[in-house]
Image (cartoon, grey):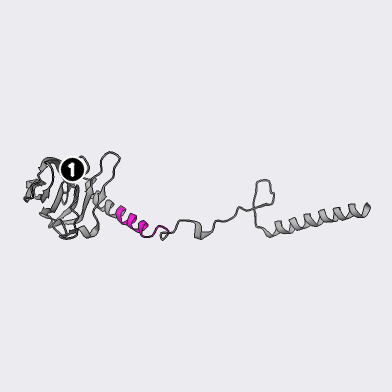
Amino acid sequence: MAARVGGAGASRSRGRADDDVASARRPTCPSSRSVRRPCPREPDPKMAAPSGRRNGSGGANLWVSLLLAAVALRPVEAVSEPTTVAFDVRPGGVVHSFSQNVGPGDKYTCVFTYASQGGTNEKWQMSLGTSEDHQHFTCTIWRPQGKSYLYFTQFKAEVRGAEIEYGMAYSKAAFEKESDVPLKNEEFEVTKTAVSHRPGAFKAELSKLVIVAKATHSEL
């Protein structure tokens, strides 16, 4: 029996020795009680943040959208009293235009030209505003109910007196819990003076247009 007891004691001693060696190999962190304790495991640098590739190109598209939104909203922050005017968008396949001026001496103009097919007239709005120094102006054209049910065969939002810095077109406008739904890049084009449909690629859905433009020259 003595031999067995002695063997168990030796085994426990070896176990404690192994624990002491393992403990000594682990880095220790200082403590207010001066007790040696293992440091918490350091995070793997590869796991510190999710990879941008994990979701394919979605992450990149998100950042591009956020950047464009920031560019669009920057001058809007300085707009004090935008002018909003209601107008009818009329189907029938005939080309119609609606325009509105804004700024000192009506220096800027926004023109919406379109042709559509479908049911009855829809109430749309055009909202315009200028920055405090009148060097930027914004033009937003949209259907307040969110989505238009007209079939647009063409559209063009044009600015006069300024050059476009940012332009975007949407198949659905934000309404209640719904968000803006942008057109695909191949469906429309943005030039220095207009946002317009691309013939053959535009899928006939339009509910909102946003333009941010800068004065073509500074007034002295």
Residue at the image point whose x is 85% and y is 56% from the top: 10
* Label 1 element class: loop
Residue 178 in the image, given as x and y percentages of width and height: 29, 42
Q: Nearer the viewer, residue 128 or 112?
A: 112
Say if the magenta span includes residue 58: yes
Q: Is residue 62 visible?
A: yes
Which quadrant would residue 89 be assigned to in this image?
top left
Q: Nearer the viewer, residue 2 or 216?
A: 2
Main structural element of the magenta stretch: helix, strand or loop?
Answer: helix
Residue 25 in the image, given as x and y percentages of width and height: 69, 60
Residue 150 against residue 13 in the figure, above or below = above
Which quadrant would residue 203 be assigned to in this image?
bottom left
Residue 71 in the image, given as x and y percentages of width and height: 26, 53
Disc 1 marks which amino acid? Arg
Residue at the image point whose x is 51% and y is 59% from the top: 45
Locate residue 2 relative to residue 220 in the image: left or right.
right
Q: Is residue 220 visible?
A: no
Residue at the image point whose x is 25% and y is 40% from the top: 175
Say if the magenta span includes residue 60: yes
Residue highlighted by disc 1: 143
Q: Nearer the viewer, residue 152 or 45?
A: 152
Magenta span of residues: 54-65
